[in-house]
Image (cartoon, coloured by chain):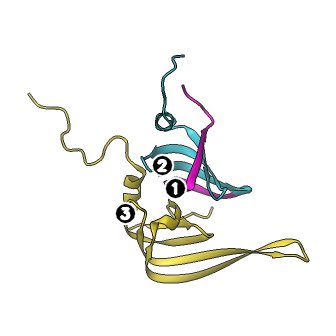
């Protein structure tokens, strides 16, 4: 009698969020971090702490300056590129596929 | 309606597949359909929208939120 039960399940019916991040390995991703920082890079590795190795990264730091005369908020973004980066997981807020403008 | 002892984890299992709002410590709101979550409260949302004061960005597909940043979930459709 054939056993219908799958004895080896590489993926369960309910996947964890980390399993879904695994699907993004070697893809470009968008990472939102604490302190108004954003990263866009290629995900090479990650772990359960969300420590990550990202390649070919563009980091964006956003600062808000308040112009007291005009009562304006000026959003300034500083960007720079980093070829290979280790990201410590406790700074990560959100991980997503890159934002598509449209 | 039977009263059963429910832990917050049971609530979270029930709202999988439902639209939720996740509030982060930083005050940012994420609204989307809850795809899955784990014991650390890491969250996967689908069709997520990010709200800071006004609407900022739209994220389609999956968005993963690290559990320690999330402090509140609420579901628009509460199921018993």
Q: Tell me whether the residue at label 2 lies in contact with that at label 1, contact meaning CB atoms closer than 8 angstroms.
A: yes
Q: Nearer the viewer, residue A3 or B14?
A: B14
Which residue lies under the disc numbered 2? Answer: B41
Choose mark 1 or mark 3, whichever is in front. Answer: 1
| Chain in yellow in the render | A
Count of labels shown? Answer: 3
Q: Image quadrant for the N terminus of chain A? A: top left
Give the number of the disc on residue B13: none
The magenta stretch spans residue B73: yes
- Please, what secondary structure does the residue beneath circle 3 have? loop
- Give the residue drawn at x 58%, y 56%: B59
- Give the residue drawn at x 65%, y 56%: B28
Cα–Cα gap, marks 3 and 2: 15 Å
- Give the residue drawn at x 50%, y 61%: A95
Q: Determine whether, in the image, residue A97 is placed left or right of residue A15.
A: right
| Chain in cyan in the render | B
Q: Determine whether, in the image, residue B44 is placed left or right of residue A79.
A: left
Residue found farthest to the left: A1
Which residue lies under the disc numbered 3? Answer: A47
Question: Magenta residues, as a range?
Answer: B56-80
Q: Which of B46 and A92 is in front in this view?
A: A92
Label 1 and label 3 in one chain: no
Q: Neighbour class for label 2 at 10 Å: few (<14), some, many (≥20)?
A: some
Residue B56 in the image: x percent, y percent?
A: 68, 59
* Vertical side of A14 occupied by B5: above or below: above
Which residue lies under the disc numbered 1? Answer: B68
Residue B53 in the image: x percent, y percent?
A: 74, 56
């Amino acid at each position: 009698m054939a056993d219908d039960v799958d004895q080896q399940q590489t993926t369960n019916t309910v996947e964890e969020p980390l399993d879904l991040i695994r699907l993004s390995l070697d893809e470009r991703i968008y990472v939102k971090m604490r302190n108004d920082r954003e990263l866009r890079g290629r995900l090479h590795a990650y772990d359960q702490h969300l420590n990550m190795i990202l390649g070919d990264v563009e980091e964006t730091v956003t600062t808000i300056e308040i112009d007291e005369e005009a009562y304006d908020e000026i959003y300034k973004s500083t960007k720079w590129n980093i070829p290979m980066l280790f990201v410590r997981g406790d700074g990560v807020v959100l991980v997503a596929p890159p934002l598509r403008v449209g | 309606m039977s009263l059963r002892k429910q832990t917050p984890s049971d609530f979270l299992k029930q709202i999988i597949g439902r639209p939720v709002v996740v509030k982060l410590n930083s005050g940012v709101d994420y609204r989307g359909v809850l795809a899955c979550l784990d014991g650390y409260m890491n969250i996967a949302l689908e069709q997520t929208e990010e709200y800071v004061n006004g609407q900022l960005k739209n994220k389609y597909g999956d968005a993963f939120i690290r559990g320690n940043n999330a402090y509140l979930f609420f579901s628009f459709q509460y199921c018993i």
